[in-house]
Amino acid sequence: MTELSSGAAAHGGSPGASSATDAQPILELRELEKRYGFIQALKPASLAFRRGEIHAIVGENGAGKSTLIKLLTGVIRRTGGKIVWNGREVELATPNEAIAHGINAVHQEVVLCRHLTVAANIFLGDETVKFGLLQTRDMNRAAQKILDDIGFNLPADALLGSLTIGQQQLVATARASLRGTRFIIFDEPTAYLTRSEAAQLFALIRRLKEEGVTIVYISHRMEEVFELADRVTVLRDGTLVGTRNIAETNDAELVAMMINRSLEQIYHKETIPFGKVLLETRNLSGKGFNDVSITVRAGEIVGLYGLIGAGRSEFALSVFGRNPRTSGEIAWHGKVVDMRNERTAIDLGIALAPESRRDQGLNLNLPIGLNINLPVYDQINSGIVVNAGEEKRRADQQIKDLGIKTPSRNSLASSMSGGNQQKIVIGKWLNHGAELFIFDEPTVGVDVGTKAEIYRLFAQLLKNGAGIILISSYLPEVYELADTLHVFRDGHLVGSQAYREKSHEDILAEAIGV
Amino acid sequence: MTTEVTPTSVAPKRNFNFLFALTLVGLLLLLCIVLSIATPSFATGNNISNLLRQGSMIAILAIGQTFVIITAGIDLSVGAVVGFSTVVIAGLLQAGVPIPIAIVITLAVGLAIGCFHAFGIVKMGLPPFIITLATLTSLRGIGLLITNGSTINITNEAFTLFSRESFLGIPNLFWMVVIVAIPAFIFLHLSKWGRYLYAVGSNPEAARLSGVSVPKMIFIAYGLSSMFAAFVGIMLAARLGVGNATQGDGWELQAIASTVIGGTSLFGAIGSVHGPLIGAFILATIANGANLLNVNSFWQRIITGVLIIVIVFFDQLRRRSR
């Protein structure tokens, strides 16, 4: 309760880094609460959003961030407390009511129509119509003007599906910023963006702020919070822990508020002697990457850093036998192998936790247990039927070992939070066992606590004699963890270094190519 | 330690499925009770046998259809395969081929048709709806070409007698359902192939990256569906004593309806063997009852439609509340 009042005190307190006037908060939460039966998803929270501020909200998965977003966008109804919009108490019972007030959200996953044009998506539900006919040309022109105005270099008549995820995210943002929006919630918008796309997004967010729009920015990435926000509110276990002016706080304090653990403890690195060479690629080329030669030894983390689209994931998919190689060779334990398909790679002892949990990693509408056992069903049969006891035992073991928070192995994977979903993907491969683990962006959309758990798990795998390829576009992660760090740019390997040999800036320069 | 099972893991999902199956059985029983009261001719041995015979064929089609729908596909061809198979088996029998060999050949033809579907889907990249729709129309054409549009009468008494006889007081045709359903249940619910089928339907890319051969599972699903349809064709030929390519008209829709009533999701990855079985017999009971009560047969179609909406709606509610 004391934490609560500290949160409430912060908004009424000293003027922050924000230049926004404190006249009247645009949106105020008073003892806002959400319960599901006996579970309090959000304990009574009080918070005031100032007009034209960028307000970051941070917290681990399950801290109550999504509950808060859903309450503010009318997706779910509160069970207690009040929401005051522009000085007037409002219900916010439906999404339409929220939109009518001018509250909009941009989600991490783009929820637009892939088969329509950019312009059609921007004007979806609000089309220009003359004599009952769509004015496609007018809309294209108007959309192009909007895009040009806000500095997005995108053609308005392109199909949305032909754009990268990052570009689609920018379109979603452009859409949300129209139609009289006064309040936009961004839910981890940069999770799938490249650096330059993120920069464009930030520019737009700052521009919206100047126009007096209030921004709520939810992110796991601390550096973004410090780059962008005026104030930051921390949630933990459904409790509003506190609000800080960004100028008066730092990484360490926020992390301490989010979890009871210090920053150094997150990147867990142990010195493990390298063993024999597991994997060697020799001048490997394929779709999206060219002439890549790397080696991975037992006990080693090989980091592949680069921007999204630099060819790292494509390289990994070829090593895993998912995509064909066009030239070069792959050697496993010193012998050249023909990586015909995924099965070949899996049988050799290679595991891949792919880039997208949703699209590649999980069977979302199936039980957790089935997901965990999917690679091993060949091994756990008695006669023609699956050994049910073994199946349960293996699922429960991973759930227990990894601390997957679920009532049962029969719960659907879709019901899990991002961090727990990532644990399911990892559990699948721990269950199968492998000598080489390829982790492609393992901590995207994962909270700090789970990140730390995943990193400790890496060390455990290395100690057991495995090697790891760690692909990430989050530099601190690969920088702090990788024994050897390779940098990808435009499908080529443009630099390599041992642990902490070069500076962040040098590596970044290599990745961007300046 | 290794045998430790957490007490909280008492499969809530399976209980729910069980509950749904129970609801369907309840509905079926309710129908039977109401019909027994409404018409004296319902609860007679003759009529029940007739009902079981009629329901058996759609039930087997529905099981095969379920495999396909679990992979998020659809098989529109099963009715046509039934008709075509009656022609194949009738032709073979009339040519003097012994019954067992004729049956094996007919099943092989069915399997080949299913493999053709899978080939179209996997290798040619055609949507399941399209490739099976194409077979639906062309297979009837091929059957009519072979027979020159006429009907082949089956003179093999032993073959046709089988469909009329009973074993332990239960019609042979219903025993066929048992013979198909038990291995089907083992396949879908107890073997790794079943798990793979669900995985392919849920997310083929994730299944692939977990080492599941997606093309192989597509071949198995469509192969089984068409083979089951050929099996039904044999049953139908035995029952009617003729081979005719126009038989089984619209049965694909009845099979799909049974599957959906039985709790299968057309989006894939959700379904069972027992659900569609019960679904098929619910539809058969409605048709049978409507006949006995002299309800205009047009009403049957309407009732079936309403039933699909009601049952699937409640199933959706159930899933959402979970």
Image (cartoon, coloured by chain):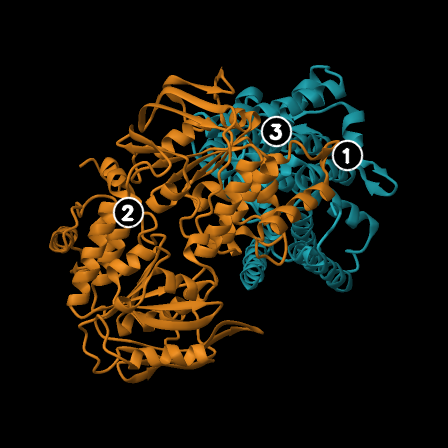
Chain colours: A orange, B cyan
Write down the residue under mark 3.
B244
Circle number at residue A251: none
Q: Is residue A276 left or right of residue A256?
A: right
How far separated are the C-alphas under marks 2 and 3? 58 Å
Are labels 2 and 3 assigned to the same chain? Answer: no
Query: In the rendered structure, which amino acid carries the disc numbered 3?
Result: Asn
Position of residue B209 measured from the top left corner of the image (x, y, whole percent) = 50, 34
- Between circles 3 and 1, the one closer to the viewer is 1
Q: Is residue A268 left or right of residue B306?
A: left
Front residue of this view, candidates B143 and A121: A121
Front residue of this view, candidates A447 and A364: A447
Q: Is residue B75 visible?
A: no
The residue depicted at 58 percent of the width and 53 percent of the height is A403
Position of residue A451 measured from the top left corner of the image (x, y, whole percent) = 46, 51
In the rendered image of this protein, does residue B243 appear above or below residue B62? above
Please state the chain letter of the residue tagged with numbered disc 2 in the rendered image: A
Query: In the rendered structure, which amino acid carries the disc numbered 1?
Result: Ser
Write down the residue under mark 2.
A166
